[in-house]
Image (cartoon, helix red, strand yellow):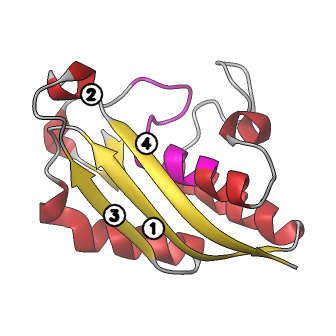
Amino acid sequence: MWLACLQWDDEGSGLEGDSDGDVAVHALIDALLAAAGLGDIGSLFGVGANVHGAGMHGADMLRETIDYLHAHGAVVQSASITVVGNRPKIGSRRAEAVAALSRLVGCPVSLTATTTDRMGFTGRGEGLAALATALVNID
């Protein structure tokens, strides 16, 4: 499983998706593009098995997104991601994930986690969700 640019070996096969399924990175990319008024992850990478983003690693997608933002005069100032789910326990690797994300984005990226108290698909352990916000300056 890939989450927040880290591989979590103890979490099984990971999440399904056209890419590596890193929901934290995908939410961050959506927030970055939306804050810059440049669409969303689907408009940049496509949707489906035969598109540009198919099979891509989340870190590579994030690098490409940052390059795309810079090419359009956008500079990320800060970002925040919240992962919703029971596992993995983010706290054990939070500092490592924050360092990886911040290095890739080029500014502080915070990472938090929460549960839904056993409600819904995340509460039943059937998957994860992530929400992100970003502050982007446009030249």
Q: Earlier in the sequence, mark 3 or mark 4?
A: 4
129 vs 121, left or right, is: right
Residue 56, numbered circle? none
Q: Do the residues labelled 1 and 3 touch (CB within 8 Å)?
A: yes
Q: Which of marks 2 and 3 is nearer the N terminus?
A: 2
Give how far across and how far down residue 63 sits, in percent.
64, 62
Report the amino acid beneath label 4. Answer: Asp
Give how far across and how far down residue 74 sits, in percent.
79, 72
Report the amino acid beneath label 1. Answer: Leu
Q: Mark 1 points at which residue?
A: 101
Calculate the distance from the C-alpha at mark 4 to the C-alpha at mark 2. 12 Å
Calculate the distance from the C-alpha at mark 1 to the C-alpha at mark 4. 12 Å
Compared to residue 33, the image places residue 54 above or below, namely: above
Secondary element type, mark 1: helix
Which marked residue is nearer to the observer: mark 1 or mark 3? 3
63 vs 74, left or right, is: left
Question: Who is closer to the viewer here, 130 or 103?
Answer: 130
Q: Do the residues labelled 3 and 4 touch (CB within 8 Å)?
A: no
Q: Quadrant of the C terminus?
A: bottom right
Q: Mark 2 points at which residue?
A: 13
Calculate the distance from the C-alpha at mark 2 to the C-alpha at mark 3. 22 Å
Q: Name the residue under label 3.
A: 111
Q: Earlier in the sequence, mark 4 or mark 2?
A: 2
84 vs 25, left or right, is: left
Report the amino acid beneath label 3. Answer: Leu
State which region is magenta.
16-30
Q: Mark 4 points at which residue?
A: 22
Compared to residue 65, the image places residue 50 above or below, namely: above
- The residue lying at 19 percent from left, 64 percent from top is 93
